[in-house]
Structure formats: structure tokens, C-alpha cells
Image: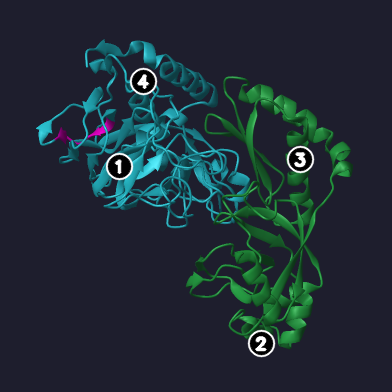
């Protein structure tokens, strides 16, 4: 469907699900692999792909025709996708994860259980948004899925790792936020001087790894060098 | 080359170009000038390329002292510019000398003005653009708005223009306090009741004080949504008219976050997003519907107008 006068939106559903999101990323990769000349920029999200096009080179109708054809052949591209796996070191609890205790209590678990459940599975990067470089990851195990804070914090430190319902996220910079913060990573998720500027891309896979404070501090110092 | 020193910063003065494209998938907004038309003309008046970086000022202009001779042009909102206290006109090439002070008077109409300097403002290119993204703290002049004491650098022009240019009077936009903008309905107009759509297209909305480069919150009749629908977040284009549960629409502008969960009832056409750049708090906005094909025709006309603008400028002496 048309979005204003120079973009169109392809929706694959209205749910947060791996299946729907997978289709979004496959179509996104298919478009970028084919280097469609008239496409300027694509924005993949949970459930849809926003495609900006050059109105001088194509019309809405022409592009819809082209993309429909591509959508039917998505399986061909699905095979060729190599997923990147990014390991994210996290210090859980304490001043780094002030809400770890709350999440554990909410589900009547030990803190260690929350850490294990959070770090044992792989997450898909559904989309990046909210602030530059903020990855929305899914999905979190039902056992630790926790609603957002009733009152958002005015300041969440950079690197904070959070949970909101069945989603996980990482704050790339200090910003306001209402997610349950269970830990912090020393990795820098966004740097405007780099290309690409974000450490991870939509469609990538992320796995959290528990580290101790000393490793965090060493890592932070190394990154600052 | 040092060009000028900021004596007073004005309310919100930043370095901008046409914007940062290709990084929305990483959560990076497009940023860039709020009024493309005035910006491109400012550049053309000093013989720059259409995308050379300029200063964008909002509601209250800065005071700038030039350190070197320069050719400049001021376009956009009418601020009564003066050089060394003497009235000068916008929409034409001006010559300033080392020591000259450019000031801006009270705002007469519009919201944002542009100052182009021959050569273009010299700031590092970040992710393909010289635009400032203040919230992210990058781009433009140190990723922030200008403050007193800053020294603006510009690229050394190959030559000075031998003759200046003047924008023909009939091509200078009149910025009214009542703005009509055209919207293409969708992508989530089906989240709204027929009455909701009718409300949006028949009401007059007021731009509230909560309006900046990220977006304009509007006050006016509430747009009714269908009850049951809860939307999963997706991408937000510049110009989107999104409606939170309160029913009061928010116009998405250039520094807005790239994803969000409010349904978008419509999207303002590209030429009209540029015109909205001159809307300020208390201005009135009315939305009218346009078909996607008509919107495309108008967009192509708009692009043609801009690309032919250079030939329409009137040559003047310096």
C-alpha cells in the first residue's frame, strides 16, 4: 500500500512473531541483493517493510508489480541468507541490572534462573528503532517475560539490557526508558563514525553471555582506547 | 576557512543539508532542513550546489559576525535581517565584509530561515550528510545547536560571484498562519472509523507549543479509532500523521524516531512536508485528501520546479 508520495509498505502480519519477521528480512535482503535501481532505502520492522523509491525512476504501480513477483519467489532467497551471530557479554544484576530482583520475584524464580533463561537462547533482531542502534530482540522465554515499569526511568545508562513483555532490548546510549533492566553490556552498539553505524543489523542473531564485573571493566577500557 | 562567529545563538540554530538517507534501518532519522524549497533557493542564490550545508534558524534568529568577506543569501521565514543595523533583504545575494554583523529582527511570517554562504558550511560528513541530529549528538556542528562563541567554517569558494541573483517576487512563498496540506491516506487508515477519517479531513488543527524538528503535536478534534485494534510497531516516514490513543494527531517531522507503535492515518506529501517546515505554534493546519497518483504528479512537478529554479533567478549587480 502507498505511504505518502514516494514510499510503499509491505505488511506481513500484525503480530510479533519469528515467522512474520523472517519474511520481512528475506524480502529486504532479496531487494538489496538484486540492487533494484529504483529503490532508495528499505526499513524492515517486526511485521512490515517500508520501501522508499525514486519517483523519477518508477511509479508505485510498477514497483508493486516488481515486488509482488519477488515476494512469490522469496523461498529462493531464504536459502542463501547467512545469519550473523553476535555474542553480547552482560554483567547481570547489582547496579548494572537494578530490575533483576524484581523480574525474579515477579515469576517466583531465583536470580540465577532468570540469568540462565535469558542467556541460554538465541534472539533474532526484529528491528532497530526508538533511538539510533536500539535492537528489538525476540523472543524472551515466557518464564521471564515481564511487563514494563509503571513509571519509565528518566535515564537508563548506555549498554543496559532490558526486558519488556516477550521482547529483549539493549540501550545503545543513555536515554529515558521503561524496560526492566537486568544487566549491562560494555559493547558499543552505535557509532555514527562507523559504517555501518550499528553493531548489529536487523535479521542478525544475538546471544547473551554472562560475564563478571572485572571483565566488563576491562572490556570498557579496551573500547575506550 | 573561517567564515563567521556566533555572537548570539538564536533560539535553535543548526547546520543542515537535505538529510541523511540510507540509515533509517539502523534507527537513524533523516534529519536535514525542514523547508527544502527555501534551503535549495538559498544555495542557488550564492552559486552553491543544492545540497551544500546551510544554517537553519527557528523563530528567533542568531547574530553572526563575519571574519572574512563572503557572499550570502537569506531565505525562508521573514525575520527582517540587518547588516550592521541596516535593513537588508532576503531572497537575494548579499555581499558581507570582514567585521560585518548580521542580525535578525522580529519574525514577520513563517518559522524557519536559512543562511547560505558561498562555498557551503564546512562540517564533517557523518553517515553521508552534514545535517545535525541533536538528539543523537552527531552531524552538523559537533552534533549540537550553535551557541555563542562558535566559529563557523565554510569551504573556500573557487571564485566570488561576479553578479548576484534575485528571486523573482512571484516565486517567493507567502507563509500564512493557515496551512492547507495534502495527505495520502494510509498506511493504517483502516485502524480508524469512517467518522475518524471524516474528522481528520474536515477539522482545523492548531500547532501546539510542543513542536520541534521531531514532530508537531496538534490540538483539535479527536480522531476516532476502531476499538479493538492494537498495532505492532513499524516504520514511521517523515510526514506521517500518527494518532495516539488521545485522538490528537502528531505530525512526524525530520528528527523523529524511525519506528513507533501509533497507527498512521495518513502521510503528508513531500512538497507539503517542506511547507510545514514554516508552520509554528498556534498556526492552523487543515488536511485534504489526495490520491496517490495525483500526489506523484505533483511531486514530479515540485522536483522539476526545484531543478529549473536556477534558470529563473534574476541576475543583479553586486
Helix or strand or loop: what does disc 4 sit on? loop
Q: Are marks 4 and 1 on the same chain?
A: yes
Of residues B18 and A16, the one drawn nearer to the viewer in this rendering: B18
Numbered disc in front, either 1 or 2: 1
Magenta-highlighted residues: B75-83
Q: Residues within 10 Å of mark 1 (few under 14, many from 20)?
A: many
Marks 2 and 4, how far apart in space? 71 Å
Quadrant for the C terminus of chain B, please. top left
Q: Between marks 1 and 2, how big is the CA–CA gap?
A: 51 Å
Dot 3 or dot 2, earlier in sequence: 3
Q: Residues within 10 Å of mark 2 (few under 14, many from 20)?
A: few
Q: Which residue is mark 1?
A: B57
Majority secondary structure in the magenta region: strand
Q: Secondary structure at mark 3?
A: helix
User: Would you identify the image quadrant in which residue B236 lies?
Assistant: top right
Query: Is the residue marked by circle 3 packed among few (<14), some (14-19), or many (20+) residues within 10 Å?
Result: many
The residue that disc 2 covers is A105
- How is colour applied across the structure in the image? by chain
> Do dots 2 and 4 share one subunit?
no
Report the chain shown in green: A
Q: Position of residue A135 (x, y in %)?
A: 65, 58
Give percent across and percent down for residue A155.
48, 71
Q: Is residue B81 magenta?
A: yes
Disc ID at residue A29: 3
In the picture of the structure, the residue carrying the numbered disc 4 is B159
The answer to whether residue B284 is above or below residue A186 is: above
Residue located at (87% from left, 39% from top): A75
Q: Position of residue B135 (x, y in %)?
A: 45, 55
Tag 3 near tag 4, CB within 8 Å: no
Amino acid at each position: 500500500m502507498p505511504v505518502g508520495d514516494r514510499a510503499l509498505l509491505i505488511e506481513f502480519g500484525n503480530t510479533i512473531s519469528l515467522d512474520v519477521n523472517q519474511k520481512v528480512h528475506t524480502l529486504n535482503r532479496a531487494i538489496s541483493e538484486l540492487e533494484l535501481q529504483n529503490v532508495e532505502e528499505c526499513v524492515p520492522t517486526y511485521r512490515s517493510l517500508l520501501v522508499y523509491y525514486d519517483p523519477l525512476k518508477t511509479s508505485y504501480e510498477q514497483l508493486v508489480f516488481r515486488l509482488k513477483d519477488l515476494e512469490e519467489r522469496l523461498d529462493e532467497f531464504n536459502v542463501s541468507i547467512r545469519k550473523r551471530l553476535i555474542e553480547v557479554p552482560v554483567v547481570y544484576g547489582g547496579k548494572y541490572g537494578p530490575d533483576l530482583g524484581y523480574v525474579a520475584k515477579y515469576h517466583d524464580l531465583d536470580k540465577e534462573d532468570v540469568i540462565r533463561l535469558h542467556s541460554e537462547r538465541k534472539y533474532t533482531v526484529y528491528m532497530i528503532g526508538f533511538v539510533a542502534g536500539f535492537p528489538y530482540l525476540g523472543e524472551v522465554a515466557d518464564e521471564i517475560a515481564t511487563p514494563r515499569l509503571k513509571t519509565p526511568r528518566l535515564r537508563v545508562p548506555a549498554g543496559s539490557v532490558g526486558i519488556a513483555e516477550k521482547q529483549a532490548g539493549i540501550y545503545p546510549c543513555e536515554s529515558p526508558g521503561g524496560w526492566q533492566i537486568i544487566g549491562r553490556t560494555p559493547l558499543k552498539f552505535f557509532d555514527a563514525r562507523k559504517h555501518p553505524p550499528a553493531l548489529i543489523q536487523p535479521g542478525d542473531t544475538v546471544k547473551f553471555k554472562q560475564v563478571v564485573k572485572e571483565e566488563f571493566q576491562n572490556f570498557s577500557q579496551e573500547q575506550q582506547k | 576557512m573561517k567564515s563567521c562567529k556566533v555572537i548570539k545563538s538564536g533560539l535553535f540554530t543548526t547546520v543542515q543539508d537535505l538529510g541523511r538517507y540510507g540509515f533509517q534501518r539502523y534507527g537513524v532519522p533523516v534529519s536535514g532542513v525542514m523547508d527544502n524549497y527555501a534551503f535549495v533557493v538559498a544555495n542557488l542564490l550564492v552559486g552553491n550546489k543544492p545540497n551544500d550545508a546551510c544554517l537553519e534558524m527557528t523563530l528567533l534568529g542568531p547574530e553572526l559576525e563575519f571574519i572574512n568577506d563572503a557572499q550570502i543569501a537569506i531565505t525562508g521565514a521573514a525575520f527582517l535581517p540587518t547588516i550592521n543595523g541596516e535593513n537588508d533583504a532576503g531572497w537575494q545575494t548579499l555581499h558581507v565584509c570582514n567585521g560585518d554583523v548580521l542580525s535578525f529582527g522580529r519574525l514577520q511570517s513563517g518559522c524557519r530561515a536559512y543562511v547560505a554562504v558561498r562555498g557551503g558550511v564546512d562540517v564533517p560528513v557523518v553517515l553521508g550528510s552534514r545535517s545535525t541530529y541533536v538528539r543523537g549528538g552527531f552531524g552538523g556542528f559537533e552534533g549540537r545547536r550553535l551557541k555563542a562563541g562558535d566559529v563557523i567554517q565554510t569551504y573556500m569558494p573557487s571564485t566570488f560571484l561576479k553578479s548576484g541573483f534575485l528571486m523573482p517576487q512571484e516565486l517567493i512563498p507567502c507563509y500564512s498562519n493557515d496551512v492547507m496540506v495534502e495527505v495520502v491516506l494510509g498506511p493504517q487508515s483502516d485502524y480508524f472509523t469512517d467518522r475518524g477519517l471524516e474528522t481528520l479531513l474536515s477539522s482545523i488543527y492548531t500547532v501546539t507549543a510542543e513542536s520541534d524538528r521531531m514532530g508537531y503535536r496538534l490540538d483539535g478534534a479527536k480522531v476516532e479509532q476502531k476499538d479493538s485494534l492494537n498495532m505492532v510497531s513499524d516504520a514511521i516516514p517523515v510526514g506521517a500523521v500518527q494518532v495516539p490513543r488521545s485522538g490528537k494527531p502528531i505530525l512526524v517531522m525530520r528528527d523523529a524516531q524511525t519506528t513507533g507503535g501509533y497507527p498512521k492515518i495518513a502521510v503528508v506529501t513531500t512538497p507539503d512536508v517542506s511547507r510545514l517546515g514554516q508552520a509554528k505554534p498556534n498556526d492552523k493546519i487543515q488536511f485534504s485528501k489526495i490520491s496517490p497518483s495525483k500526489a506523484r504528479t505533483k511531486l514530479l512537478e515540485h522536483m522539476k520546479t526545484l531543478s529549473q529554479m536556477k534558470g529563473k533567478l534574476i541576475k543583479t549587480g553586486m
